[in-house]
Amino acid sequence: MKLIEIVFFFFAIQLLSSALVILFTRNVVYAAIALMSTLLGVAALFVVAGSDLLAVVQLVVYVGGVLILLLFGVLYTYRDPESYFEKKHVLLSIVTVVCIAGALLFLLSDLPFNYPQLETSPHDATGITKRTGYLWITNNLLVFEVVAVFLLVVLVGAGWIASHVLDKSKKDV
Amino acid sequence: MIPIDYYIIVSILLFSIGSAIVFTRRNILYVLMGIELIFNAANINLVAFGQLDPYLNGQLFSMLIITVAAAESVVALAIVIVLFKKLNTIDLNEITQLKEK
Amino acid sequence: MNILDHIQESLQYLAPEGMLVLALLAVLFADMFQATRKNAVFATLTIGCLLSVGVYVGYELFDRNSIPNVEFMSNMLVQNPVILFSKLLLIISGIIEIVFIQVYHYSQYLRERGETYMLFLAILLGCFFLVASVNLFMVFLSLELISVPSYMLVASRLDKKSTEAGMKYLLYGAFATGVMLFGISLIYGLTAGLDLFSERWILAFAAIPVFSKWIVLGLVLAALFFKTSLFPFHPWTPDTYEGSSWGVLNILSTLPKIAAFIFLMRISALFEGMQSYSILIAVIVGFSLLVGNFSALVQQNVRRLMAYSSIAQGGFIGMALLGGGDLSQQSLIFYLVTYLFSVPVALFILDYFEHISKGDAVNNFKGFGKKEPIMSIIFVLVMATLIGLPPTAGFFAKIFVFTSVWQYYETIQSPILLGVICVAVAGTVASVFYYMKVPYFLFFKEFENTVILTSKHKSSLVFVSLTMLPVVVLFFCPDRLMDLLKVIVAYI
Amino acid sequence: MNGLIPHIDVPLISADDISVLALTIFFMPIITFVLLFFTGKHILAPIRSWLATGVMAVMFVLSLYLHIHTEGEHISRWIWFEIGSLKFTASMLVNNYSTTMMVIATFVSLMVHLYSVEYMRERRNHSKYFPYLALFVSSMLGIILSDNLMITFIFWELVGLASFLLIGFWYEKDSSAAAAKKAFLFNKFADLAFVIAIMMLFANYGTAEISVLKEQVSITPLLNAGIFGMPILIGFMIWFATVGKSAQFPLYVWLPDAMAGPTPVSALLHAATMVAAGVFLLLKTSFFLGDWVGNLITIIGCITAVLAALQAMRTFDAKKVLAFSTVSQLGYMMMAVGVGANDAAFFHLATHAFFKACLFLSVGAVIHSMHHMQSHQFDHGQYKDLDTLDMRLMGGFRKKMPLTFVTYLISYAALIGLPFFSGFLSKDAILGALYDWATVSNTWTWFVVAAAFSTVAITAFYMTRQLIFIFFGEFRLLKTDMSYKQYFDHITESKWLINIPLIALATLSIWFFFSINPLHAQTGWWMKQSFVSGEHHVFHFFIPILASVLSIGAAVIAANRYKNVTVFVDRYVGLTKMFAQNFYIEKSMDVLLIRPVMLVAELCGSTDRWINHLIHGKAYFILVLAQCADVFDRWIIDGSVHLVSAIINGIGSFFRSYLKGNVQQYFYFTFIAFALILVWLAWYL
């Protein structure tokens, strides 16, 4: 077994077990930390797959942004973890995981995946970053611009909704 | 190079765990985390398939997904906070005013 | 050709979207810099923008010199008469919605916030992109551009019910998006491309074994079914309808539906003759008709009733996706035209009645027929449109849809299609009962409400009757529209 | 669409003078409707009513003129709209048949208008009455004139709408609103068949033009079509559409209830014209009725005639008795249509229109005076709930209202078929046709003939009963409440506006308007005109004699039975209870039609419950299985079965609240439903 495969398996097991922690833990803070671990594992898989830039984006946006937001939400809404817990959920979770995973594995096991295959990897580590940037502002320029509009709208809208909580002058309906 | 099937297996497992979280955990924040996991499963697939794509469609798409997922969770958090203020709970079993009578 | 030149050349086709973005920014600045909110700056800006976009799009549509079918922005979007026409529909629908918010007294909190108009423009922008997109990048992005502002609009009343509705809608929508993304990733793996409508992609897709073809397709279509609230992605509909305000519902039930159905129609044209696709759609449409029509029968609450009715209407429109021929496409657009005019009127009048009776149960509307005769008669007319009864264009819309499905059935003789037709006929019969429930209460029950009715609603009456007018006019000359559509759908 | 609808060249024909005149007559009530509907309460009531009546009089005169001057057929046809290359045409046919029907319709309408001027004077909500009547008349004329089944369908629906508005005219009354709704729904149910018929026509012939279809069908005779051939099925569907409108078994239950509207409306809609529209249409499209459909029509008509007549025997509502009798007579007409005696059916339709309208209006005059009593008492400070329609409370009006009595008596004689009255002639024609049909058919057809003859007797019985209840004896209301005495003494003959229509209609119920020979109609001018082609039967001498003997005998029996009626209530015993319950038709419809629909609705509304039940059922099944298996191997199977049932119960408990507000259950629902669809598709493909 090559080193890269060992690395792959290590991170795969790490991310899946962290995901299972989210599934089974009662404490939502642990879950948030496990989510971070999962996202880091995914970032590592990205590196293994040769897209370092994406791993960095994953770290910056997810771990730096989404996770912090989630933690804020966790702290704001914290309540006794036991109150969310029911025993039957454990069994049900296992059943759901097994069913979905089994079904998908069965269905996708013999699909003729036809992904782009070149003889050799066309880009090295710096090349991929450069090429990503180039593609974003040429072929996918429209997507890039529309995402900008989208983010602006989300910013304003989320601000509008969240400002209601901060505005003490309004009384509750 | 890692065989592509490994990635697919990991992503399927991640997808099913994420779905299970979405289906069974009653706390809205857990559900949001589960949705993030589902998005990440798709990302793993895209990146794995796109390793050799000269147009890098897979990578670009997963970057798009990361951005959109972040935006979506921002909105979700905003609504969660208002909801918590109004109903004083984020337990999905208790948020059931709207239902079939 | 150099990529930069290509982009520069593409910009001319992006003028409508550009104008929408400009209007969005203008509304944002106006919102920032004005002290008092009680004026009509936002609405004026938005409607002005919509009108100018409408004129531009109309000019492009009827301009003989324009190129009929062109892909631009490195095969992200496409421009052809069908798309221009559907953009025109979206513009009309958008104008109706803005006027809806303006006319109605009780949607004040929506009317006076700049954010409403921003989110609305973002949804419209998303719809514009969705109808024109030929690439999964744009499909996904435009769906998000429709969905996320919708979540915020639903939650925007910020009371208990509306935040709950927004939360449920968001969770459900995010889940559907996740499923769709997983499907997209598989499609990417299977066909090595995201450019849906290219020759290469179609060939690659055709090579996939039939069994996995529709599983992947089903996953991708999940988000579109969610937007059009088709079975089994419908459960959010009743709750969201119950929780949010009518002005928002109006946006939710017209714009995204029109865009998503036009997109589904283009996809169907792509897969014309692929039996597994049409059977999948047939099953989903059949169940939607069943669930929508028969669940609506037992509803006492008008909001939930309209929700199930929208599921059922989605089913009826979806029937036009089955055939895939010219007639199906014509009838789908025809149905959408009647739909976009009639649904806002129905919602507006229900909104009006709900506010004067202080409750959304059908029981509260007893005897309003005498107090509000014109409103009630127009309401009966709208319900007739939705059922598909003669004095309105809904009649022809239904006839065309049924004819197209029957035609398809005669060619492939599939029992599933026959089942769909039977369910649709049964559903039409059932729909008579639930659509006529409200008029029944309006006209045949004694008035027992103690609330004093407001009579200052001339603008409402004008709005309602003007919006209803095209539906009645279309009944008398459906051939004009059908002839126009016949020319247009040739370009799909 | 071009592939679906066969192409057919339909020649366009421009309108000639006669057609233009017919169109003018058709548009007159529409103008009246628009004028009166939108001016509403702004013009005075007398002006409004006299305007409508005046227009109607002009229409009657014009129709008469049209009838006299019409010879042969005048078709005019023009394009309605086009879809692609497909042309939808609209057309109009003026011939003897339609002009006769126009004269009948406008005449009865004119009489009803005159009557209504007086009758509606003091009634509330008057302002919409005449516009609705005008709407009704115009749509009726539309059915009569149109030569295209699609156009006919539009007017068919409009007639339904107008009758809905008029039956529910006093919509404050619950019974009135319910009756209107009932009439509407029953008619709509039958109208579905009409839609199907039109679709089938387009699919097979590519047009709905009746005259074109007639040629098409004659090219390919019905005999070649097979038992379930297309033209025969189309005929069946058209007949089923008329089952609703012409109140045939089992959909006739709406008609008696529809008497909740104003009495003149009942006379116009449910006696003279609207219910006749079905028979009229069926006669017009009779070339479709082949093979078994004719027999079916006859049998159903026979059942209708007998059942309705039986019910009329036990009804106390004065108007409902007449309503049931209308249903019964419609059954006669349908029998005649079924055996191919089209002329006889149309003849009976015409005579029935006059004498039934007269009966209704006479009874209406009595009810009018009962109303007066009630309102007088109300004016004197007392309000008593009085059922003014109950025959048991009437009696002795013979002396108070002699003119009304005479008109009633004439039309009564016409209905039960006494010689020298119009009903005698037309009934004889139908019975003779039935007899001829039976002689050449199987044995079972004699049952139909026997039923038809016995219905003659039953008709005489219940009409005599009503005659005695209303006009003879003493005023029975006084037995319960003497306070009405002073008002009863003041009852006099009605105003002349009410009397003129009565006299006119009663006059038309006498034989010489239809045939000079009072005993035999075959030689009369009416039957000679031969409006619709049909077989003429040979005159059998014994038929009129037998019918007269039967009806006179039954009348005598009834007169004896009810001569000294002082008892107030007829008891419902045994069989008669069944009559009073409408033969349980409504109940069975409830069970057969409404319940299943509601059941499906319930099922869909609570998917969770049945999935849950399913899962529970499965769990129980497995448990039972486990018990059986226990005998063999308690230890191995038991554990696994418990595990399975626990899992199933666990999932079931999540399903319990689908659409109960928890969004996660929605996820489950979506996921499982989607997975099931995909799996099923995999299996299917």
Image (cartoon, rainbow, N blue to C red):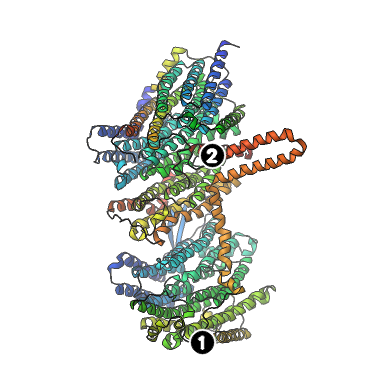
Q: Measured along the vertical axis of the image, is residue B97 above or below residue D442? A: above
Kindly report which numbered mark, 1 or 2, lies closer to the viewer in this rendering: 2
Badge 1 element = loop
Badge 2 element = helix
User: Could you say which quadrant of the image residue C89 lies in?
Assistant: top left
Quarter of the image where the C terminus of chain D is located: top right
Q: Position of residue C22 (x, y in %)?
A: 30, 32
Q: Measured along the vertical axis of the image, is residue C254 above or below residue D77? A: above
> What is the residue that sits farthest to the left in this orientation?
C35
Q: Measured along the vertical axis of the image, is residue D561 above or below residue D150? A: below
Nearer to me, D173 or D68: D173
Point out which mark residue D669 bears.
2
Q: Measured along the vertical axis of the image, is residue D176 above or below residue D198? A: below
Q: Which residue is mark 1?
A: D516
Q: Position of residue C158 (x, y in %)?
A: 35, 38
Pointer 1 and pointer 2 on the same chain: yes
Q: Residue at x 74, y 35 (%)?
A: D634
Label 1 – label 2 distance at C-alpha: 79 Å
Q: Residues within 10 Å of mark 2 (few under 14, many from 20)?
A: many
Q: Position of residue A1 (x, y in %)?
A: 61, 12
